[in-house]
Amino acid sequence: MKMIRISATFVLATALGAAAALAQEPVPAGKFGDWTAYSYKTKKGPVCYIVSQPVKSTASRKNIKRDPAFFIVTHRPGDKVKGEVNTIIGYTFRKNAPVKLRIDATDFILYPSGDGAWSEGAATDHKITAAMKAGRVMVVTGISARGTKTVDTYSLSGVTAALKKIGELCKVR
């Protein structure tokens, strides 16, 4: 199975507003179209991320209970991480069922762990963020542990400006 970057779980919890023991509360750095940029400080230095929620969500079954879904791109200079992509889906993913990420006509695979999914690594993250900047629509398709298929559609309006902002705030060398 592909390596899942567990450290992103820390960022996910913060993105959802949970207080992290070693971090300050996230500070908004701007709203850019459908994306919002945030930053906060840790013992290892600043962490910056952009986050958006789906503009449309559908499910294969009616009346499902689901927490909010998010798509996040994170820079963590203290860990030399730039552009780490992940999604929080709002339910527990089916084990070992790849998550499909489509940006316009380009497909990527994300690997689930709990209610989150990540790419294969930094090289794929770079390809995904480049596609996000060039794209118009992003779709995340996943299957819950109960077998419900969900399709979340995200607007990419403002993603380039939001990524530029966190690039300014969290320079990764």
Image (cartoon, rainbow, N blue to C red):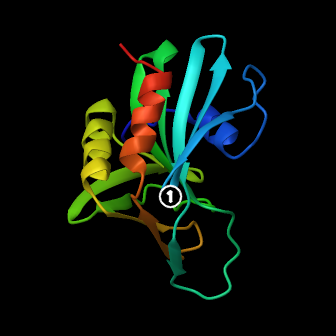
Query: Mark 1 sits on what residue?
Result: 34
Q: Where's residue 112, x and y in %?
A: 48, 51
The amino acid type found where label 1 is placed reads Asp
**Residue visible at 68% across and 86% down?**
63
Seen in the picture, residue 30 relative to 168 is either above or below; the reply is: below
Seen in the picture, residue 169 relative to 1 is either above or below; the reply is: above
Foreground: 73 or 39?
A: 39
Left or right, residue 10 beside residue 96: right
Left or right, residue 29 beside residue 138: right
Q: How crowded is mark 1: few (under 14 residues within 10 Å), some or many (20 or more)?
A: some
Judged from the image, the secondary structure of the residue bearing numbered disc 1 is loop
Q: Can residue 158 be seen in this view?
A: yes
Left or right, residue 99 beside residue 23: left
Left or right, residue 81 beside residue 37: left
Q: In which quarter of the image is the C terminus?
A: top left
Seen in the picture, residue 98 relative to 14 is either above or below; the reply is: below
Q: In which quarter of the image is the N terminus?
A: top left
Foreground: 101 or 54?
A: 54
Q: Where's residue 87, x and y in %?
A: 50, 51
The answer to which quarter of the image holds residue 68 is bottom right
